[in-house]
Image: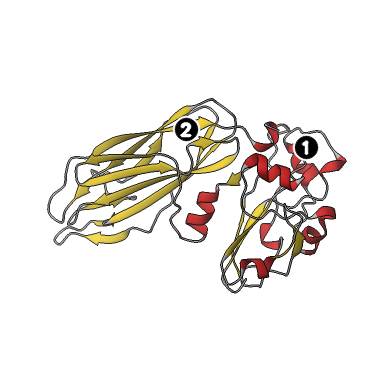
Amino acid sequence: MSTSTQHASFPATDFTRIGPPIGARFPDVRLPDQHGRIVDLHAARGARKAAIVFHRSARW
Amino acid sequence: MLGAFAEKHGITYTLLSDEGSHAIRELGLLNEQVQDHHAHYGIERRDSVVGVPYPGTFLLDEQGIVTDRRFLDSYRERETGVAILEQGFGIRSSEHGPETRASAPGLQLRAYLDSDGYRAYQRLRLTVELAIESGLHVYAEPVPDGYVALAIDVAPIEGLAVGAMEGPTPRPFTVEGLDEHFLVYDGTVQLSMPLTFTEKVGDREVVVTVRYQACSATDCLIPQAVELRLPLSERNNVESDR
């Protein structure tokens, strides 16, 4: 058994438990965009497919 | 803040701001492990990093139903937009890195990377397309002794992690009178593998070797090793070029 902490494995995440599941309708989201306009996610995409990308803040 | 960020980085798609992380919490995407993740990478604890989501992508169909969820184990590693479009939606992106083509016995080869540049921890994808001549096939693993299976090798570069080859399932093939069972590809086949630079190593050339043996039902051509070279420039990550 290794006692080294330097190569400890990356803290695991069960991604199946995070966020809306496959097969569910993505919840309604209303948030301001980069121009300060309030965007309703489903209204904005109309009847089109969409990729919703989550990432950390633009601040850091 | 988002307006200036979008302008600086040439972002034309919609960016949404979740001040206070209310939507992130309601969606169940709040990253409660971020301090552990940072500790793993030796990053000092900072209270300002709370409230961020797990980085990932949800793909929605026309009705708004989630059809795919794309998360990577390390928060540092991210897919390219091209990979999300091509793998997630199955549509061919109009933009990718420069292509290299080669003619070789029994087939035409085409290879390209998602982008002409790499960023640290961005997961690029190498795509190799084989257009196999009609009447010929190429063997896939596993092969009996004496045959050469299709293999794609990327020459080692320090700091470059190369993932496993992905592609369509090869079809079973048997030769009448022979007791050997094969798996083969024919027609046009696209294979890909993930490439991730975990450090910046300057502008590089990715050297790809495609090994294969093309055969018909009765004859085999000599096994080949074809080298393809793809130039790749180093790019700064967003947080380090502000």
Task: Please say whether residue B203 is visible from this viewpoint.
Answer: yes
Classify 10 Å Cα crowding around label 1: few (below 14), some (14-19), many (20 and above). Answer: some
Expressed as whole percent of the image width and height from the top left, the position of residue B66 reads 62, 68
Compared to B159, does B138 lie above or below? below
Q: Is residue B123 left or right of residue B56?
A: left
Q: What element carries label 1?
A: helix
Q: Which image quadrant: the C terminus of chain B?
A: top right
- What residue is rendered at 64% in x and 35% in y? B237
In the figure, residue B168 lies in which quadrant? bottom left
Reading the image, the residue beneath label 2 is B232
Pointer 2 chain = B
In the picture, the quarter occupied by the N terminus of chain B is top right
Residue B28, given in percent of the width and then of the height, sits at 76, 61
Q: Is residue B89 above or below residue B200?
A: below
Given residues B65 and A45, the one toward you in this image is A45
User: Which residue type carries mark 1?
Assistant: Ala
Instruction: From the image, tell me which residue sits under label 1.
Output: B39
Subunit ID for the residue under disc 1: B
Q: Of callouts 2 and 1, which one flags the residue occurring earlier in the amino acid sequence?
A: 1
x, y percent for residue B109: 29, 44
For the residue carrying disc 2, how many other residues have a C-alpha within 10 Å: few (<14), some (14-19), or many (20+)? Answer: some
Q: Which amino acid does label 2 sit on?
A: Leu
